[in-house]
Amino acid sequence: IFFRTCRRTAVNMRNTLTPERAPLRRGRIIIENDSSVHRARFKELDEHLEALVSSWRASSRFVWPKHSMTQKSTSPDPIDMPDVVAQILKTRGHGRAYKGLPYQEREQCLATAVEWVVHAAFHAPQSQHVKAQLRDLLAIDLFTLALTRGNFADLRSKISQKMTELGKPLASLPPDAEGVDLEFGIPKLMRPDLPRQVAQTNDGILPSLDNVPVINADASGDAEEDWGETHWDFQHSTKMHESVFIRVLILIAIAVEGTFHAKIRALGKTLFGDDFEGFHPAAVKSFGRMYAKLLSYLDHRGESMRPRPALNVDVVRCLVAVQTTRDIGTFLALLAQRFGGFAKVKNKYLLSEQELREEYNLRLVLVSVVYDMGCTYGDLVEAPETQRRWEEYARPGSAHADGEPESRRRRHIAQAVRWLRSPSVAGVRVRMLCEVQVCTTATACVRGRMHELFRIYRSCGKVALYKDYNTAK
């Protein structure tokens, strides 16, 4: 602030000076009529302030951005922002650059913005500034929801091309896979007691929904005794019991994720040493993401089983990156031994060339395990850490992140908490299906580069894309 103030003062002094004016004194700096003297004096001031700021940078505990007082930064953003995108970001869409334009010109403006979105998503891992601008743009409803069907199809097509480009180096099987059984012995590691369609509501995982009713809640979010109890009804969408069940999954996941991640990290260190750094935890799957899958025919909308959100077996998840393909099999064997086998497996090492191209050449193994927390729901709900985290999750002011009205979110969370505190489930052990993704370090690096691209590509429509990015209150 001091630097900017001094610089602004010096510029104002220079701009207001005229040859006809008498010499003026500003502190210790004398401004005279000779223009050469003016330049020398201001150059001296610039050099003095540059040295002062440099000394502050050297002594400060903060990381100061490199900045030259005589020229602009030499490290611009990796991509240029079109005027139409800058205008949308500046006005939050209310002063749209394409407003009132003929249809074809409006389409061209949106196409230009879509092109920038693709490049921004590609460069987002290298630039936090570009990532912030991209997320800010897609969170503007007057832009994202204004995309036409053609715009959105063009966006997904170009995003897919970028991911294909990133995945090309992984197209050929790595040399370290030679002589390795790419089934990794998985058929022998599967649990025979679970059905083929694995869900959180399978016997022995979550409490039976048939025996434990859900407590009604009023519009304020408080469950009232005179409202009574009702059985779960997942057939009538007006009751929104599937939305309540999503809250149940999230609340359990919030309580489970810490200990589950700790066990997976410990397994990695047991196998690869204390300096193992290939463990990467992920946040609990969001309400918005599970609800979007509920509405998509590509995911759970067409499923006949109820509740459909129970098919989310990756609410708690993590990634383990190992050095070689052989290490994948070693880690999977130890993982199966620790958790009593696998409930579900997706082995992308066995995909055909065409299927692998559709997966952008990302070879990894996704396994779901039944995690037993070692306590009952009665113990869980009384734990201070669980209560603290549940209260934090239910705190007012977070409904915007879920794309839900505040009153509905409060009511559904209240129903979910009351169900988990029910005496009928107090003696049931806490178990949950959790996912572990295992791949090589090379695959993990490419997958990280694709993160923002895939986040856009997975959206089934512009509404889902907007809800995924809209985190503004």
Image (spheres, grey):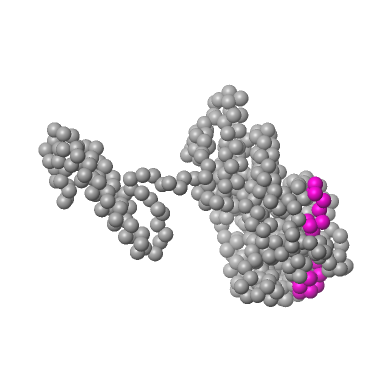
- Asked whether, in this view, residue 180 is left or right of residue 61, the answer is right
- Asked whether, in this view, residue 450 is left or right of residue 95, the answer is right
Question: Is residue 166 positioned above or below 444 on the image?
Answer: above
Residue 413 at x, y = what percent? 65, 59
- Residue pictured at 68% horizontal, 33% vertical: 150
- Residue pictured at 65% horizontal, 75% vertical: 273
Q: What is the span of residues highlighted in magenta in the rendered image?
A: 333-355
- Residue pictured at 66% horizontal, 71% vertical: 265
Residue 336 at x, y = what percent? 79, 70
* Residue 432 visible in image: no
Residue 390 at x, y = what percent? 62, 65
Question: Is residue 182 positioned above or below 290 on the image?
Answer: below
- Residue 459 appears in which quarter of the rendering? top right
* Residue 267 visible in image: yes
Residue 125 at x, y = what percent? 57, 52
- Of residues 445 and 282, the one nearer the viewer is 445
- Of residues 323 and 22, the one nearer the viewer is 323
Question: Is residue 115 positioned above or below 288 on the image?
Answer: above
Q: Residue furthest top?
A: 102
Q: Residue furthest left?
A: 22
- Residue 12 appears in which quarter of the rendering? top left
Question: Is residue 297 positioned above or below 379 on the image?
Answer: above
Q: Is residue 297 magenta?
A: no
